[in-house]
Image (cartoon, rainbow, N blue to C red):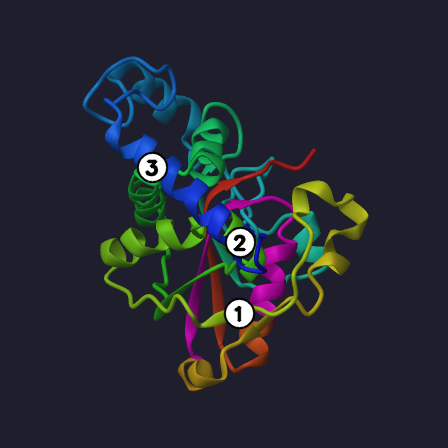
């Protein structure tokens, strides 16, 4: 007879098997599968960096959507019409091939060794900012308990750990809680995504004092519509944060 905890045990075992397979099998390039001692073989790394470099184009300083002009200090039309709760966004890449495949390997293939690589590339993008105001602490976008149990790890936290070390900024992995299980944004119609995230996040009571007048850096793997990070930024601002910056590995270009 299966107990109430058996599904979670099964999910944990599957996550462990994926992790063991990713770490104990001979090293392979994450893109082409060729044998190599690094995550990416030299040809793929060159193609990856050249095709995925996100700071080669002007971006809105608030949401990081591409801009048609050359003034990197300006805001896009969407942010001018309705300012989001967060104050700035830094991204390393557009969410497009081959970056999307690498992020999917991390998120759904449990290839956790990719997380430090993403942190390094995001750190490079941060260093390229002309006016960078470093946050006082980092907070990864939290997963709900059910999704965390199913996946076995939080990809945003895996990226935030090495990024915090590179930035020399404290990491607060339990600062925010996802208090309401939500549907995956990728499976929600665009017009329903904001409502799907309404009141989904809360600040842990024991950490509320940290946010008073604080600059928070929210770390995520992919920023698409921006509703997820905006909901979390709203929770941070409501708890007393003075400024919120989004640090996302990839940004989905608007269609």
Q: Residues within 10 Å of mark 1 (few under 14, many from 20)?
A: many
Q: CA distance from mark 2 to mark 1?
A: 24 Å
Q: Is residue 61 visible?
A: no
Q: Residue at x 81, y 49 (%)?
A: 191
Q: CA distance from mark 2 to mark 3?
A: 30 Å
In the rendered image of this protein, does residue 158 appear above or below residue 254? below
Report the residue that reaches farthest toward the front: 1
- Whether residue 218 is in magenta: the answer is yes
Q: In the figure, is residue 72 to the left or right of 172?
A: right
Location of residue 58 in the rendering, given as x and y in whole percent from the top left corner: 50, 39
Helix or strand or loop: what does disc 1 sit on?
A: strand
Disc 2 versus disc 3: nearer the observer: 2
The residue beneath circle 3 is 114
Q: Earlier in the sequence, mark 2 or mark 3?
A: 2
Q: What residue range appears in magenta?
A: 211-234
Q: Earlier in the sequence, mark 2 or mark 1?
A: 2
- Whether residue 163 is in magenta: the answer is no
Helix or strand or loop: what does disc 3 sit on?
A: helix
- Callout count: 3
Q: Is residue 255 visible?
A: yes
In the rendered structure, find residue 6 and report the number of the disc placed on it.
Answer: 2
Q: Nearer the viewer, residue 78 or 194?
A: 194
The residue beneath circle 1 is 177
Q: CA distance from mark 1 to mark 3?
A: 25 Å
In the rendered image of this protein, does residue 99 appear above or below residue 67? above
The C terminus, quarter of image = top right
Disc 2 versus disc 1: nearer the observer: 2
Report the residue that reaches farthest toward the right: 191
């Amino acid at each position: 007879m299966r107990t109430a905890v058996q599904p979670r045990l099964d999910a944990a075992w599957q996550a462990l098997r994926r992790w063991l397979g990713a770490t104990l099998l001979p090293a392979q390039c994450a893109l082409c599968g060729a044998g190599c001692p690094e995550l990416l073989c030299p040809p793929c790394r060159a193609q990856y960096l050249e095709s995925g470099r996100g700071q080669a184009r002007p971006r809105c300083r608030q949401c990081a959507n591409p801009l048609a002009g050359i003034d990197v200090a300006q805001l896009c039309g969407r942010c001018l019409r309705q300012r989001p709760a967060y104050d700035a966004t830094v991204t390393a890449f557009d969410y497009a091939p081959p970056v999307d495949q690498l992020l999917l390997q991390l998120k759904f293939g449990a290839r956790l060794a990719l997380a430090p690589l993403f942190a390094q590339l995001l750190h490079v993008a941060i260093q390229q900012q002309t006016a960078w105001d470093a946050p006082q602490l980092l907070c990864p976008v939290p997963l709900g308990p059910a999704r965390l149990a199913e996946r076995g790890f939080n990809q945003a936290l895996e990226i935030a750990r090495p990024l915090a070390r590179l930035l020399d900024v404290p990491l607060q992995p339990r600062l925010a809680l996802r208090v309401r299980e939500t549907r995956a944004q990728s499976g929600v119609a665009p017009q329903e995504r904001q409502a799907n995230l309404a009141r989904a996040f809360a600040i842990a009571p024991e950490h509320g004092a940290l946010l008073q007048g604080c600059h928070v850096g929210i770390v995520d793997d992919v920023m698409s519509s921006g509703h997820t990070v905006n909901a979390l930024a709203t929770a941070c601002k409501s708890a007393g944060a003075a400024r919120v910056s989004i640090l996302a590995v990839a940004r989905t270009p608007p269609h």
